[in-house]
Image: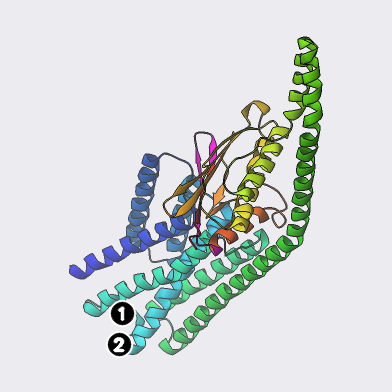
Amino acid sequence: MIYTLFENIATVAESAILFWFLIYTLSFKEIPLKRKIVFTSGFFLLLIDVIEIINQHFTIEGIFISAYCFILFLYSRILLQGKWWHQLLLILTELAAIFLVNGTITIISSIVLKEEYSELLLMRNPARILLLFLSKISLICILLPIGNAVRERKFILKPLQTLLGVILLITSTVAGSAIQKIMLDNLLPSFYTTIIMVFLIIISVLLLFILTQLSFRNQAMIKQVYLETRLKDDEIKLKESIQWNSSVRTLQHDLKNHMAIILQYLRNNDTENAVRYIEQVSGTMYHYPHYTDTNNPAINAIVDLKRSVCTKENIDLKCYILSELPEIDDITFSVVFGNLMDNAIEAEVKEDRTNRQIRISIETLGSYLHLTIQNKISALIPISGRIPETTKQDTIHHGLGLYSVTQAIDNCNGTIEFTQNNGWFIVDVLIPIDNT
């Protein structure tokens, strides 16, 4: 009785690991917490019940794979973010990991215990409990690094590569399940089934290695394109800064002349022309940014530059910035703030002119500089893992701004979080304060 209980606990633990992996890598959609709990609990119980029913009435291994895929894929489509082929690839990765763990442990334990494969399942001793425990721990050890890589966007595959991975994973998983069935039914001598199983395990490991190498190549391609486009972006920003600086200098130079003309009107008691002239000058000055007054010149410059762009694009910008800011790495702040503001402005330009709003906040939070950028959105933005997905067709040349942001934040041991709430897209960034 106690061994049956442990087997049921192992089934529950395995199902919990599968759900945890999907939630950790894909993240929930923007839905109420109560609905998340109810749906997750319902699908979790459904998977366990289906497994128990299949164990009692069927002996075909393929039914297990189909049940796992259908329930987990349906759950992912309803509650989790990401494209459907990404979700399917992760589910098949889970099943392949289960096959690798079970196959490896079965072969090793059969050799160590000198038991037939079918006799291992019938064992009712502490060794059986230990094998169940080892299989779940091994499953976590395999899925955890994969989940971290996907969540941090360090595992990047194109749609065609993803499709190829799905096909190969389905083939290897189905073949592995068939061989496991042959092993347990003793349809072939143990020597031959062991060789076949070892080769399937090697093939699965090589498949994972190939997908990893494709991911590394995609990352290298993104970095190459990023380096090529970064120079162009810097040239454009430099021209904008020079133009803005020239405009401000022109305004400062002309200010004395404007004041002299206004003063002459007032001396002649010609208040009507003085007022009209002031209104004309004020209309011209409106197009120039107001000065941000903090103790950090770099922050002042980049905030004023983005303020001028917002004014030009008819975006309502509200700033809440401490006047006395701590010392930070100006380059890191410029990369992070500049790219995030560019994304917010680009998003607002697509919104209705009456709904264009951006809020920025720069303050200290403990030993960190806390940067918050919020922009109005009329529709939810899909977020895959750590960062939002680009909505543009050219995924290679777009999304590089967020890539450079995450790289800069990782290099300074900071954090970044993207959330959506009540029609606002919110980015929270923590940058360590330089106390040296």
Q: Secondary structure at mark 1?
A: helix
Q: Which residues are magenta?
A: 411-425
Q: Alpha-carbon neighbours of circle 2 within 10 Å: few (<14), some, or many (≥20)?
A: few
Considering the image in quadrants, where does the N terminus appear? bottom left
Circle 1/circle 2 CB separation < 8 Å: yes
Compare marks 1 and 2 and give the one earlier in the sequence: 2
Pick whichever, 228 or 413, lies toward us: 413
Tell whether 403 sits left or right of 178: right
The answer to whether residue 181 shows anywhere in this view is no
Asked whether 210 falls inside the magenta stretch, the response is: no
Tell whether 426 sits left or right of 68: right
Main SS, magenta residues: strand
Question: Mark 2 highlights which residue?
Answer: 113
Q: Alpha-carbon neighbours of circle 1 within 10 Å: few (<14), some, or many (≥20)?
A: some
Question: Mark 1 highlights which residue?
Answer: 120
What's the distance in space between the residues labelled 1 and 2, CA to CA?
A: 9 Å
